[in-house]
Image: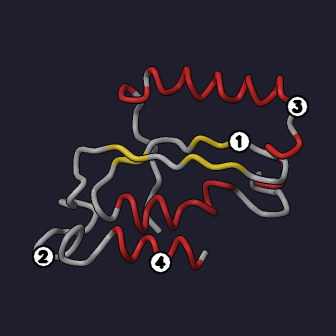
Amino acid sequence: PAILKGWTDRAFAAGKIYGAGRIPYVSGKFKGKKALLSLTTGSSESYYAKDGDYGDINGILKPIHRGILEYVGFSVLQPQLNYEVAHLTDAERKVLLQKWSERLKTIFEEEEMQVGKY
């Protein structure tokens, strides 16, 4: 978390990316651009379900989707999620990489996700 916070503070500098007359969520520096998160987990997908031990993955990611990406104008795409990657076989890993490769071919046509307000 501290590394992400430090990167966010440097990359999304006040006055450069937000502020300076820009209206949050409306006219941010990245209006008209798309963003997505790509991440891996050490645990299985069931841990990130609404009733899972860690809670809904979309709820976990909402502060980043809404509070960072949408705040500066990005349209947010569905995250690329790969669960328990340390436990995958080489064949399973190749399938994940193939799916990601296929998604990237049409990434610019994807509709934005509805993150929702807090």
Residue beneath disc 3: 89
How far from the left and from the top, in percent, is residue 61?
58, 60
Mark 2 and mark 4: Cα distance apart in space: 21 Å
Distance, label 1 to label 2, CA atoms, is 38 Å
Residue at point 12% right, 76% down? 20
Task: Specify few, some or many for label 3: CA neighbours under 10 Å numbering under 14, 14-19, or 20 or more.
Answer: few
Residue type of the residue flagged with mark 2: Ala
Q: Within the image, what quadrant is residue 2 found in?
A: bottom right
At label 1, the amino acid type is: Asn
Judge whether 60 appears above or below 46 on screen. below
Q: Is 118 positioned to the left or the right of 81 in the image?
A: left
Q: In percent of the image, x 74 and y 24: which residue is there?
A: 94
For marks 2 and 4 on the same chain, the one whose residue lies earlier in the sequence: 4
Residue located 10% across and 73% down the image: 21
Q: Position of residue 32 (x, y in %)?
A: 23, 44
| Amino acid of disc 3 | Thr
Q: Which residue is mark 2?
A: 20
Sort mark 1 into few (<14), some (14-19) or many (20+) by Cα contacts within 10 Å: some
Q: Nearer the viewer, mark 2 or mark 3?
A: 3
Horizontal side of 99 relative to 32 (left or right) equals right
